[in-house]
Amino acid sequence: MLDSVLDNKIIQLPFYKQSTVGNKSIFLKMNFGRPEILDTTGVSALYNAEILSVDLVFTDYPSTQTLKPLNKKRFQNLIQLCPNIVQQKQAQWQIIRQMDGRDKATAEKLLHGIVVNYRDKPAEAFHQKEIAEIKQFEKLITVVEPSKPAAIAEPAPKKKVNYWSVIHGGQITQPRYYANKPLKEVSNKPIVVGTDEELIHTSTKTVKNFGLLTNDEQQRFGNTDSVYLLVGKPIDSKTTTAKEIENYVVAKEPLKDSSLIKPLLRSKWDKPLVVADVTLSMSPYIVQLLNWLGKPEQKNVIQYFACFNDGDDMENEKKKTGQTGGIYGSAFTNIKAITQLVESTMEKGSGGDTPENVCEAIIKSLAMHNDCNEVILMADNWAAARDIELVKQIHKPVRVIICGGSTGTHVDYINIALQTNGSLHFEDNDVTNLQNLKAGKEVTIRGVNYKLNEAGNVVAVRK
């Protein structure tokens, strides 16, 4: 097995970056030019784990040497330390030569050793923890009524309206409310908060969409990203009927990761259907997706939402191509309903083995709602598509947003994007030139070159 890996040639990168979101990672350090593992702390975590990739990382120094005997000994030392690692068929074995080590001094500063990316095998406690993260997000969702103020017990006496000010100053004559709280003042800097008052920092765009800014305020704060709102005590909303509630607002909370939300925010989508992988270890990305979906401007963009859990905890050996299930969807109405749909789908199943029913999920989601122009797929880069042969049944462009990993991407997702005239999207860049592969050209994705082989399959180009 080792000879096969070593003969599969090498991926050349400027430098290697460890992946730590959506997976766990252990670095087994080795000295420059030496095969011995210096520190085995934490290696016991690998004994019962699901191994995603084994990355042997070294530098291009001396550049005249293949270093094959040294790298073979490094792999052998890993296997001696963790024998079960060779029995996991889904694990990707990669040899990565870092090209930024131009001399011995710089080479010694780069990583030398083996990086093992892994996930703990599915456990109910971890699954419940991920569901709890989504429930915590749901708690941040509040309802607002932007069309008219909610009824209050004792209406304030009417004030004489200065119509000249209304016309030329954009004065709003009715009371203003934000998140069911009376809005007292808007500013681009912090305001002194009095008794029974609260200061909310939110996006200017959100406040404008709710029609809460006067013309004067729009001129003063229109070019700012955020504003401060001074609000009073919440009003009694018992008299507000369900029909009057039009929007949900998601309170801001720092995201642990932004690799998914960045491509979502910078791209312009054309009447999309969103399909999300909600299997185990995807919660960091699900929270980002829900944050994006919760933005008011998405209400008129997103048509339909679907998610899948790879079979509702079906036993792995019973999963059949195109018949695995665990796919749920609905028309996009509001973020509260979508969050509850995600929670219920996660509660029905956590995924099981690594390969997932990705193509089945897209096909059945399109069958539920075919009135869309493209599909946004939130994909787990560590998981293969167990049903990649079904990709020819997908007749809408698929925009694949890759979650996880830092080097290249899984060839199944390249194929899905390629065969559907779609694209790939990462934290810092978008790959839209995949059709060059069909013309016999190479396409670079996160430092790795890909091409079509003679059988028409996407493969990595190794030096």
Image (tube, helix red, strand yellow):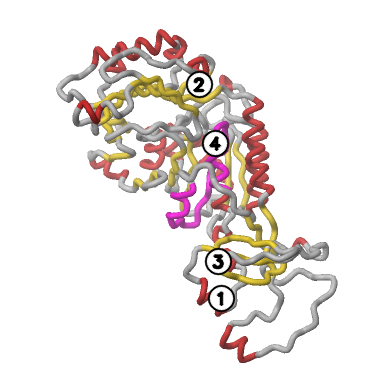
Say whether disc 4 or disc 3 marks the residue closer to the N-terminus: 3
Crowding at mark 4 (Cα within 10 Å: few <14, some 14-19, many 20+): many
Q: Which residue is pictured at 84% across the width and 74% down the height?
A: 154
For the question of whether residue 190 can be seen, the reply is: yes
Q: Which residue is pictured at 59% across the width and 60% down the height?
A: 201
Question: Type of residue at label 1?
Answer: Glu
Image quarter hosting the C terminus: top left
Residue 197 lies left or right of residue 14; in this view the side is: right
Q: Secondary structure at mark 3?
A: loop
Q: Which residue is pictured at 51% across the width and 75% down the height?
A: 220
Say whether disc 1 or disc 2 marks the residue closer to the N-terminus: 2
For the question of whether residue 181 can be seen, the reply is: no
Q: Does the residue at mark 1 contact the one at mark 3 (Cβ under 8 Å)?
A: no
Magenta region: which residues?
Answer: 261-290
Disc assigned to residue 385: none
Question: Type of residue at label 3?
Answer: Lys
Residue at the right extreme of this rendering: 153
Residue 70 lies left or right of residue 317; in this view the side is: left
Q: Residue under circle 4?
A: 282
Disc assigned to residue 50: 2
Crowding at mark 1 (Cα within 10 Å: few <14, some 14-19, many 20+): some
Q: Does the residue at mark 1 contact the one at mark 2 (Cβ under 8 Å)?
A: no
Q: Nearer the viewer, mark 1 or mark 2?
A: 1
Q: Secondary structure at mark 4?
A: loop
Q: Residue under circle 1?
A: 217
